[in-house]
Image: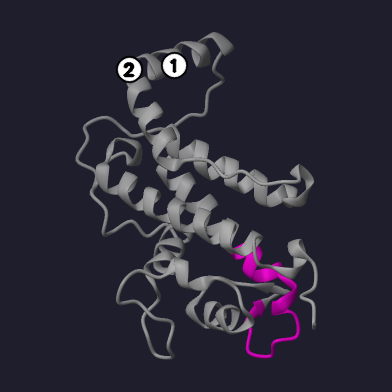
Amino acid sequence: MNSLQEKPIANHAAVKPEGGRKWWRGYFEAKGDDVARRFSEAGAIYWKPAQAMPLDLFSYLREASLCFSVSRFLAAISMSSALVEIIISRDSRMAGRPNVHRIYGWATLNNRNLREAMEAGLPVDVLCEDGENLGEGQPPIRFVRLRHRLAHGDLRDFPEALADYSPPYEEEASGQLNKAMRFLVAWFNSTPDIQGPVSSK
C-alpha cells in the first residue's frame, strides 16, 4: 500500500554522454579495488586454436565474467546459466535422445535434461554441489534453482537491497560463474564437437 503523500510517477529520460562518463568514472574511483578483486577471483579461460571456441559461447563467457567484475550480479548469474544451457541444448551427443525435454527444439535447463546430458557424457557433475544429485524426484540443484528464480523474477529469498550492493548476490553470482566456467572447460576438452570424433581403435 502506497503511503507517500506525493503521487508516484516514473519517466524515462535521455542522459547525455557526459553523464555516463561521470557516473562510471565515479564508480571506478570508488569501487576500483573491488572490481580488480572480482576480476582476479573470476580468473580467465584460455584456449587454442583461437577459432575453436564457438563465438556465442565466448560472448556469454565474457559477459558473465565482466558483469561479475563490475558488480552486475543478476546479469552475471543469468549469463552463466545461459552459457551452460546453450551447450546442453546444442551438443551433438544430446541429439536424438528421446527423454530430453525441449521447447521449440531447445533443451531447457532442468534436472531431467542435466541427467540426460550426464548419461551422454557431458561433465554435468561440476554443476552439482556436495550432497546434490540429479536422481528422479530430487529437488533442482542449486545451479538450476538459481537460474529459474532469476528468470522468473523471484528474489524473495534475497535481502531487499540493490543487488550490486548486497554480499549475498555477489556470493551467488560467484558460485554460478565458477560452475559455468568449470563446465565450459571440461566440455571443451572432451566434446567431439570440438575435439573431433573419438577413434574406435
* Horizontal side of residue 182 vs 46, given as left or right: left
Q: Position of residue 79 (x, y in %)?
A: 54, 50
Q: Report the magenta residues as a range.
A: 85-102
State the separation of the CA atoms marked 1 and 2: 11 Å
* Horizontal side of residue 135 vs 65, given as left or right: left
Q: Which residue is mark 2?
A: 30
**Amino acid beneath label 2:** Ala
**Amino acid beneath label 1:** Trp
Q: Is residue 29 visible?
A: yes
Q: Which mark is residue 23?
A: 1
Q: Is residue 86 magenta?
A: yes
Query: In the image, what residue occupies the spot 39% across and 35% down?
Result: 38
Residue density around tag 2, few if under 14, some if 14–19, many if 20 or more, within 10 Å: few
Which quadrant would the C terminus be assigned to in this image? Answer: bottom right
Query: In the image, what residue occupies the spot 71% across and 46% down?
Result: 48
Q: Which mark is residue 116?
A: none
Which residue occupies the foreground of this view, 79 or 87? 87
Q: Position of residue 3 (x, y in %)?
A: 19, 40
Q: Is residue 174 magenta?
A: no
Residue 24 to residue 35: above or below:
above
Q: Position of residue 123 (x, y in %)?
A: 55, 70
Quarter residue 33 falls in: top left
Query: In the image, what residue occupies the spot 58% across and 46% down?
Result: 61
Residue 195 to residue 41: above or below:
below
